[in-house]
């Protein structure tokens, strides 16, 4: 009886290395690991030993016999991954070598700025070595970043990854400094006084702007801010949203877009007992929203949401998911791949699920409407927004296979009282640290920070997570990302390329906080 990876998969690959027969893929050494939307268990190779179940930090792996009705689609999603032709695999997945600090150079002290998944995975890598001390700094009073404040409250299993981070924080040599902001309470130079190196793991916290007329009208805000509001982020507890109109629009169709659409339409009583603040729960109970329109500018094959996120959405009780049948069209490149049965696994699964939506019978529920080939041109309204004007788009394929959406000149207006934008993220510059404004990341080579893109190394400074590679991947993807950064840091430390510090009792500093 095979086990099955389900919706809450965080892709940290702990299960990969626990599996005695290498039946969970892609593995971190395989080229599609960084772009895979989840991991998959081969049903023909699984020996039902259960080792992966124990290793999974979010309880995403379930024996076939224990799958709920909502989890059944993942049987097909897992099995179909292995129908594509793949190269031979070794019996066991290769394990990346742990960084080894030479005894002559011990002890090593490292500061990590940020306390989300990328920071905690980096700390875990460092603490595999004896004598290493890690100080983790975060401006918020609670740790774990988006793992705590960015995951939807009804995705309780995904939130369980915080238990793993608590175990990391309990290791000897780990210390939290919460409520400490770099650039305000402490400087980069201060950190290098007490530490051989600093790792920045601050994520990509800024939304890309919607650059159209009317985007500054009351009622238009970012989906990220809305997520922070319903998750109780202290910076957003004061916000209030107008939920009095029957329709809301979400521009963008990634996972965050689906999250906010679901929270706006789900029965609020299903959120009782989660971390949703009382005032947010009351606002959702009083909401008049009956429909959320989720809009993408490209076609169905370019949907930004992941397969597990969408499969989970379709099983949300009391919420209908619909789409416009005339918008289920493929660009020529995707259509050719589909004809040859060579579609990438994730694209094929999305199309299968979308066709399931197309054939579903609508009930008298609140609903989420998926729209495609629409690009916003204006947010409408005077003192308060009343809707969005869109350009109707068409798909064109360049000679190199690149798919572009181009305006047709046809307009469409969607009335709404709330517009949330979810069109991408970028990092924010930190005082005293180089920054690449064009890409929205800290410039780096293999995790080593550079003074400028393609410039010299900024000594003693490293980066991991989204601020290193841009907003791509999932919670667990940060594990392999952190491994690469820590390997570079330890190599520099062993080679004497990091500045020496005075090793001894730490001086009292005003930013010191008790261990969290």
Image: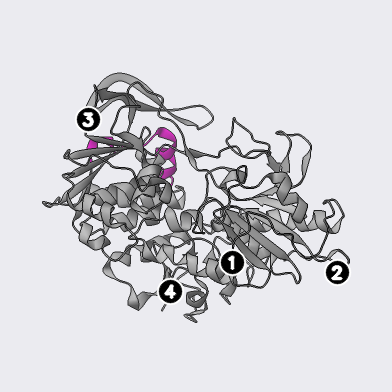
Q: Nearer the viewer, mark 3 or mark 2?
A: 2
| Secondary structure state at the residue bearing disc 2 | helix
Sequence-first disc among 3 and 2: 2
Q: Where residue 300 sits in the image (x, y, percent)?
A: 35, 40
* Mark 3, other Cα within 10 Å: few <14 / some 14–19 / many ≥20: some
468 vs 404, nearest the viewer = 468
Q: Nearer the viewer, mark 4 or mark 3?
A: 3
| Left or right, residue 500 beside residue 6 | right
Q: Earlier in the sequence, mark 3 or mark 1?
A: 3
Query: What crowding class fits label 2: few (fewer than 14 Cα within 10 Å), some (14-19), or many (20 or more)?
Result: few
Specify the segment rendered in magenta.
323-340
Residue 50 percent coordinates (x, y): 48, 80
Q: Which mark is residue 414?
A: 3
Distance from Cα at disc 4 to Cα at disc 3: 44 Å
> Of the residues under marks 1 and 2, which one precedes in the sequence?
2
Pair 4/2: label in front: 2
Q: Which residue is mark 2?
A: 103
Q: What residue occupies the far bottom of the structure in this picture?
A: 49
SS state under label 3: strand
Inspect the magenta stretch and tell me whether residue 89 lies in it: no
Disc 1 + disc 2, Cβ < 8 Å: no
Q: Position of residue 41 (x, y in %)?
A: 47, 68
> Does 146 appear above or below 49?
above
Q: Which residue is mark 4?
A: 3
In what element is the residue under mark 4? strand
Q: Nearer the viewer, residue 483 or 88?
A: 483
Q: Nearer the viewer, residue 336 or 58?
A: 58
Between disc 4 and disc 3, whose residue precedes? Answer: 4
The label on residue 198 is none
> Which numbered disc, 4 or 2, marks the residue that appears first in the sequence?
4
């Amino acid at each position: 009886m095979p086990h099955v990876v389900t919706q809450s998969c965080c892709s940290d690959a702990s299960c990969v290395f626990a599996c005695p027969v290498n039946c969970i893929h892609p593995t971190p050494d395989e080229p599609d690991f960084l772009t895979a939307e989840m991991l998959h268990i081969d049903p023909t190779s699984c020996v039902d030993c259960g080792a992966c179940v124990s290793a999974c930090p979010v309880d995403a792996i379930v024996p076939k016999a224990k799958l709920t009705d909502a989890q059944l689609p993942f049987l097909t999603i897992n099995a179909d991954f292995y129908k594509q032709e793949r190269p031979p695999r070794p019996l066991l997945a290769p394990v990346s070598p742990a960084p080894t600090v030479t005894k002559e150079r011990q002890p090593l002290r490292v500061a990590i700025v940020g306390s989300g998944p990328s920071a905690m995975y980096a700390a875990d890598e460092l603490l595999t070595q004896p004598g290493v001390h890690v100080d983790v700094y975060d401006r918020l009073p609670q740790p774990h970043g988006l793992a705590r404040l960015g995951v939807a409250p009804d995705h309780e299993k995904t939130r369980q990854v915080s238990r793993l981070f608590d175990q990391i924080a309990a290791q000897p040599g780990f210390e939290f400094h919460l409520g400490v902001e770099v650039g305000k309470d402490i400087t980069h130079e201060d950190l290098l006084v007490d530490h051989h190196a600093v790792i920045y793991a601050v994520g990509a916290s800024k939304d890309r702007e919607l650059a159209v007329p009317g985007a500054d009208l009351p009622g238009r805000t970012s989906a990220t801010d809305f997520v922070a509001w319903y998750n109780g982020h202290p910076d957003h507890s004061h916000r209030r949203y107008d939920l009095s109109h029957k329709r809301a629009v979400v521009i963008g169709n990634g996972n965050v877009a689906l999250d906010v659409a679901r929270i706006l339409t789900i029965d609020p009583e299903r959120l009782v007992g989660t971390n949703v603040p009382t005032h947010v729960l009351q606002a959702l109970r009083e909401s008049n929203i009956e429909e959320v329109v989720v809009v993408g500018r490209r076609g169905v094959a370019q949907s930004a949401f992941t397969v597990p996120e969408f499969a989970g959405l379709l099983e949300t009780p009391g919420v209908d998911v619909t789409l416009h049948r005339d918008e289920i069209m493929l660009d020529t490149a995707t259509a050719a791949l589909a004809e040859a049965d060579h579609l990438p696994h994730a694209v094929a699964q999305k199309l299968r699920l979308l066709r399931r939506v197309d054939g579903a019978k609508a009930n008298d529920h609140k609903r989420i409407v998926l729209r495609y080939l629409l690009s916003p041109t204006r947010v409408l309204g005077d003192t308060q927004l009343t809707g969005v004007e869109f350009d109707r788009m068409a798909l064109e394929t360049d000679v190199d296979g690149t798919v572009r959406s181009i305006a047709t000149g046809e307009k469409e207006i969607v009335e709404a009282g709330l517009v949330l934008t979810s069109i991408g993220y970028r990092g924010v510059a930190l005082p005293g640290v180089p920054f690449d404004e064009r890409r929205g990341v800290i410039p780096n080579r293999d995790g080593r920070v550079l003074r400028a893109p393609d410039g010299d190394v900024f000594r003693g400074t490293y980066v991991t997570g989204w601020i290193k590679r841009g907003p791509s991947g999932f919670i667990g993807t940060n594990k392999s990302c952190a491994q690469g950064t820590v390997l570079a840091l330890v190599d520099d430390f062993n080679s004497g390329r990091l500045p020496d510090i005075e090793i001894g009792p730490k001086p009292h500093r005003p930013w010191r906080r008790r261990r969290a």
